[in-house]
Each structure stands twice: as C-alpha cells, then as structure tokens.
Image (cartoon, rainbow, N blue to C red):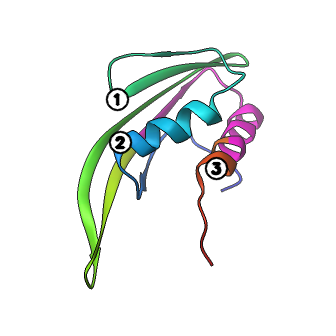
Amino acid sequence: MSDWPDHFTRDMSCAPAEWQRLLQRALAGHDWVAQGDAQVRIALAGGALTLHWAPGPARQIALLRLPTLHLHFAFDGVPPAERQAFMRHLDLHTHRGGG
C-alpha cells in the first residue's frame, strides 16, 4: 500500500508471543513504550503510532491450524511519508518466508 491511512486494521498469522518477538526487533532504534500486554505507543516524526492487537480465530487449512492476530494501527500526527516509511520497515521485520 502506498498511502497508509491514519487508522486501519490488518490480520497477521502468528501467536502473540511470536508477534512480540518480531515487534521488539522491528522497534529497535525507535522510542516506544508498552501499554499493557497487547499495546505499544511508538514515537515517530511529528507524532506517534498506537498499535494494539488481540487474538483472532485460528485459520485451518486441512490439518494445519494457524493462529491469527487482529492488529489495529492508529497514527496521530504522523505525516504520510513517515507512515509509509515506518510501515515498510515494520513489514520487512515481520514478513516471514513463503513463495
């Protein structure tokens, strides 16, 4: 996506513990604070991103069951170019193998 809106949701196929490990690596070098077990606030140029998550229903493909997380992104005062740069960075750190 080239233009990230101020608020949006996305689903990710991973368990909460795995997400937190991925997120910590992705946030290295950023000022951020955990706000409970399922929310972080990240300082970005000109504003902040509040990101929270909750487990979703497992996806099942034949005998394979994959956990899911519902992620909600809320940018506040972050210019579009900064939103795009941060999301590109986050995606690079959270996308895993595949075809």
Residue kind at label 2, given as amino acid type: Pro
**Label whose residue precedes the other's in the sequence (2 or 1):** 2
| Residue extent of the magenta highlight | 72-89
Residue 54 location (% of width, % of height): 29, 40
* x 46%, y 23%: residue: 40
Q: Are marks 3 and 2 in contact (CB under 8 Å)?
A: no
> According to the image, label 2 marks what residue?
16
Could you tell me residue 41's position as x and y percent? 50, 19
- Image-based side of 68 in relation to 63, left or right: right
Nearest to viewer (mark 2 / mark 1): 2
* Contact? badges 2 and 1 (CB < 8 Å): yes
Numbered disc 1: secondary structure: loop
- Asked if residue 6 can be seen in this view, the reply is no
Label 1 neighbourhood size at 10 Å, few (<14), some (14-19), many (20+)? some
Label 2 Cα neighbours within 10 Å, binned few <14 / some 14-19 / many ≥20: some
Residue 43 image point, x, y percent: 62, 16
Magenta highlight on residue 91: no
Label 3 or label 2, whichever lies nearer to me, is 2
